[in-house]
Every structure is written in structure tokens, then in C-alpha cells.
Amino acid sequence: MASAFVPIAALPEDPEGDDSWLFARGSEVLLVDDKWEGPRPLSTPEAQLITNHVAQPLVLGRFEDETAHWWTGQLSGDFDVAAAPIDGLILTDLRCMIGTLAPEVWNVAGRATQIADWFRDHQFCGRCGARNGMDPSERAMRCPVDGLTVYPRLSPAVIVLVEHPDGRALLASNVAWAGPNPMYSTLAGFVEPGESLEDCIHREIQEEVGVSVTDLRYFDSQPWPFPNSLMLGFFATYTEGELTPAPGEIADAHWFARDALPTIPPRASIARALIDDWISR
Ligand SMILES: [Zn+2]
């Protein structure tokens, strides 16, 4: 198990030679595809070759048992990977790196894309339009005129595997996954302001498939930086109602037995972890 990541908001004096760099542009991260070891973050000497294409270096933190820091920064829109003076450089969507990067590095890369985006998008106060300043002591952008403070945004979302008392599980296919062999997954939805996680689960399942559930059991959570979700996984038990997929959102929903599963989400997703846990019981 990798050690915990300790976030740091204030910039250290200077980057050190053994620091790691994960420059970002939207959901893409800049990596060096090492022929032998696979994709890896940039080293400090490599990062220094392209700093004129980065808005501002931002420190993310370090692993508890290491002294080296991890950094990010927003790559400029016109940065050209092919023209950069670093061999094996790739700019790739973080979704494609699930299972390729080590899980703890993938999570730091998710921090990197979110912090770089947040910094780019909050250069000015949303209330009065003055230029924001970075808070020196915490991860915040603050307006010098009216004090409005903006923290990186997280959007909690519930993701739920509904179990039927007869042993089957409810999986649904989103309209966006239409095709000859569509994927079926657990139900998910964003928490609304004013809702508890439990309120959200009841509402989402009612809205998406028209059934009621009870016996909510927390399972696990997963940061999902597309763009800034935190997925909170639960099990629930079906009580009543006829499966009625929401038009325009759910293409199909069924009760599936363990030995007759459709195409399910890839490993490393919390949806798959919920399904695998249910299968194993
Ligand atoms: Zn302001």
C-alpha cells in the first residue's frame, strides 16, 4: 500500500532535482513514455525545458514517506508535444491511463488536472472582477477587494448497486453507451445542494429507474477527476416498483444474475468494484 499523500498549498522555495511534474491541459496530462518502464511524470530537468509553456508551477504535495514534491501547471493551448525537446513526450487523457499508471500516481495526476484547471479558471473574482491572489497558507484564490475566497470544487456523486432480495442486481445502460454490445453499470448521480447522500440515492434511483430501495450500506469512495467528482459507492436493497428507465438518460435497465452478466465497466472503476464485491458474495 502506497503511503498517504500530504497536500501542500504554499510553494516551496525551489523545485528539487528529484521532484515529479504532472503538467495538465483539461483532462490531459503530460508524461514521458519510457520504453521500458511505461509512462511516468516528468523530472525537474525535463520540466525546466518547457516552463515557458506553463502558466505557473503549482506544488501539489508529497507522499508521506518521501521528501520529493509533486508539481503541476496549466500547459498553454498552443503547446506542441512533437516540437518539445524531450524524447517520448505524450499528452494523454487521464482516462486512458487507468491501470497503466500506478494507482497512487494516477490519483496525483487527478489532483494535477483539477488544481491546474481551478487555478486557470479563478484568476479573477466572480463577484467584482478584480484580479485574485493566491492565498499563501491554504489552497485558495482570494479577491483583494471584497475577500471572496474560492477553493477547488468537488462534486460528490453517489454510485449504487441495487440488490434484489432474490439475489440479482440492477444494472442499467446509459443512452450514451448505445451500440451493438452496450455496457451495463450501477446507477449514479450528483448530490444536489441541501441533500444528504441518502436523500440523493433515493431520488436518483427513483428518477432513473422508478424503483424504491432501503438498507443503504456504504462501500467505498473514489476520486473521479472528470472534471471534479468524488464517487461515493453504496449498496441498497430493492423494495418496490416496476423498472422504468428514464427517457433520454437510461436506455435499458435489468435485473441480472451473477452467471448471466452483460458487458460491465472496466477494472479500477468503483462501479466495477461494487459489481465484483456483489459477485464474490
Ligand atoms: Zn471581488
Image (cartoon, rainbow, N blue to C red):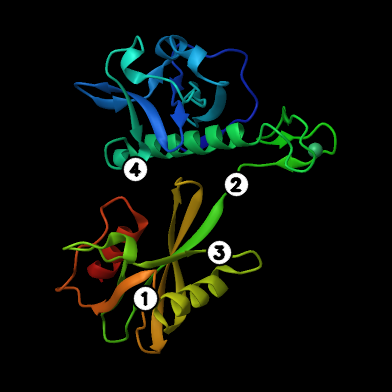
Residue for point 69% across, 41% down: 150
Label at residue 162: 1
Q: Which residue is mark 2?
A: 153
- Local secondary structure at mark 3: loop
- The CA span between labels 2 and 3 is 13 Å
Residue 179 against residue 1 in the figure, above or below: below
Tell which circle, 2 or 4, labels the residue nearer the N-terminal end. 4
Question: Which mark sits nearer the N-terminus, 2 or 1?
Answer: 2
| Ligand 1 falls in quadrant | top right
Q: Which mark is residue 8?
A: none
As drawn, the label of residue 191 is 3
133 to the left or right of 253: right
Q: Looking at the picture, which amino acid does disc 3 mark?
A: Val
Residue that appears at 65% across and 26% down: 10
Badge 2: few (under 14), some or many (20 or more) residues near its Cα, within 10 Å? few
Task: Quadrant for the N terminus, please.
Answer: top left
On the image, the x and y values in percent for residue 179 come to 21, 61
Tag 1–tag 3 contact (CB < 8 Å): no
Q: Earlier in the sequence, mark 4 or mark 3?
A: 4
Residue 243, placed above or below residue 262: below
Mark 2: which secondary structure?
loop
Between discs 2 and 3, the one toward the N terminus: 2
| Residue at the right extreme, as displayed | 145
Q: Is 278 on the left or on the right of 201, as rendered? A: left
In the image, 208 versus 13, the foreground residue is 208
Residue 243 falls in which quadrant of the image? bottom left
**Residue beneath label 4, please?**
95
Image spot of residue 177 (x, y percent): 28, 60
